[in-house]
Image (tube, helix red, strand yellow):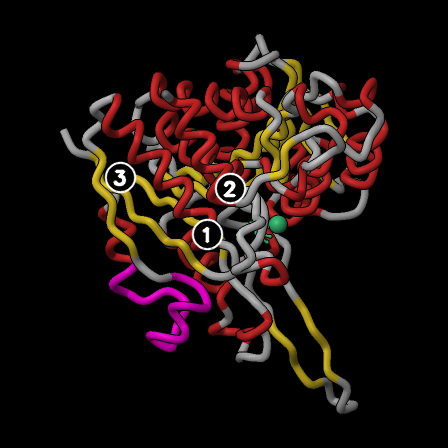
Amino acid sequence: MTKHILVLPGDGIGPEIVAEAQKVLTRVNDTHNLGLTFEEDLMGGCAIDKHGVPLADETLARARNADAILLGAVGGPKWDKLDRAIRPEKGLLKMRSELVLYANLRPALLYPQLVEASSLKPEVVSGLDILIVRELAGGIYFGEPRGIRTLDNGEREGYNTYKYSESEIERIGRSAFEMARKRNGKLCSVDKANVLEATMLWREVMDRLAPEYPDVELSHMYVDNAAMQLVRAPKQFDVIVTGNMFGDILSDAAAMLTGSIGMLPSASLDKDGRGMYEPCHGSAPDIAGQGIANPLATILSGAMMLRYSLGMPEAAEAIEAAVGKVLDQGYRTADIHTEGTRRVSTSEMGDAVLAALG
Ligand code: IPM
Ligand code: MG
């Protein structure tokens, strides 16, 4: 049976890192006989240049038909001045919302080899293994009404709407409880229930679900405290579940604990486990085209894709083991390079992973 993957390299460093991930996927496709087929398309700034919109209808249709989507990153200064409605990021948000990719899994796993690259002390971070489950298809990112309006006094006002329905909270809550159940059985729901009604309801729904998962220990934390705890004592967390905006922010913080945001993969899943896979980092236009970006987050996103959407856990494990091996061997891109390790380019890192795959 063949599995069809839509590849969207995007902008900035996107094409460079996706090329390496595709190299790795092509290799395991051959060695593990996976029957993967690839098709490439445009999303983001590159799609604006070609079609005038960041996500063309045909591309969205291809995404709907694919078994999984592999994405690089979108955006860059070239498109920042455009009308809000057609910015590169709008393409990504449209994809997430049209395909209802509401469960965004962002694992922050510290490879022991990278302990020195973390900004925190080794004793605070070694052994770190957190999963952030970020709601991705709702909340303030999509709430209406939104906009910038002119008030009667002539002053402009920007406004957004932070809202979550019970069913939206329940479906992401269930994803998170399920994930916690498969890990260490601890789930921390992060909200701002001391101020925001939307998150008061969030907390209420999480509490209502808890008795259905007696093997999971649910706790609650305000987002400001969670940000502090992430840099103070991050190992207290197992799974964190939170809304779209808080998840965006906390996952960047968690990423840095692991040494570099260049190491973090992500999965964005719909209710049937179909999904889009992308590194947590952005398009990094400042280093695009220099061959120095870290492709490991995208390579590891490919592994997540094999595991979560394609039901190919052995191939996923092979890739993850190969990444561990290249780190053991001392290969480091600029972002994770420390004294005594071997600095390599984007494609050299991809080649090292291929070699480690054997
Ligand atoms: C992320 C990114 C996106 C987000 C941007 C590019 C729209 O920061 O995936 O975390 O805010 O969700
Ligand atoms: Mg982000």
Residue at x-position 61% and y-position 58%: 287
Residue at x-position 74% and y-position 89%: 152
Q: Residues within 10 Å of mark 2 (few under 14, many from 20)?
A: many
Q: Is residue 289 above or below residue 251?
A: below
The answer to which of marks 1 and 3 sits earlier in the sequence is 1
Q: In front: mark 1 or mark 3?
A: 1
Q: Quadrant of the N terminus?
A: top left
Mark 3 is on which residue type? Answer: Asp
Mark 1 is on which residue type? Answer: Glu
The residue beneath circle 1 is 16
Q: Quadrant of the C terminus?
A: top left
Asked if the residues shown at circle 1 and circle 2 are in contact, with their CB atoms under 8 angstroms apart, the answer is yes
Query: Label 1 to label 2, Cα distance in Å?
Result: 8 Å
Please state if 335 lies on the left or on the right of 27 as rendered: right
Query: Label 3 to label 2, Cα distance in Å?
Result: 23 Å
| Mark 1, secondary structure of its residue | helix
Give 119 or 152, whichever is nearer the viewer: 119
Give the x, y percent position of residue 227: 79, 38
The answer to which of marks 1 and 2 sits earlier in the sequence is 1
* Mark 3 Cβ inside 8 Å of ligand 1: no
Stretch of the chain drawn in magenta: 43-59
* Mark 2 Cβ inside 8 Å of ligand 1: no
Residue 344 magenta-highlighted: no
| Mark 2, secondary structure of its residue | loop
Residue at x-position 49% and y-position 20%: 178
Q: Residues within 10 Å of mark 3 (few under 14, many from 20)?
A: many
**In the drawing, what numbered circle is on residue 295?**
2
Asked if the residues shown at circle 1 and circle 3 are in contact, with their CB atoms under 8 angstroms apart, the answer is no
Residue 128 appears in the picture as rendered = yes
| Mark 3, secondary structure of its residue | loop
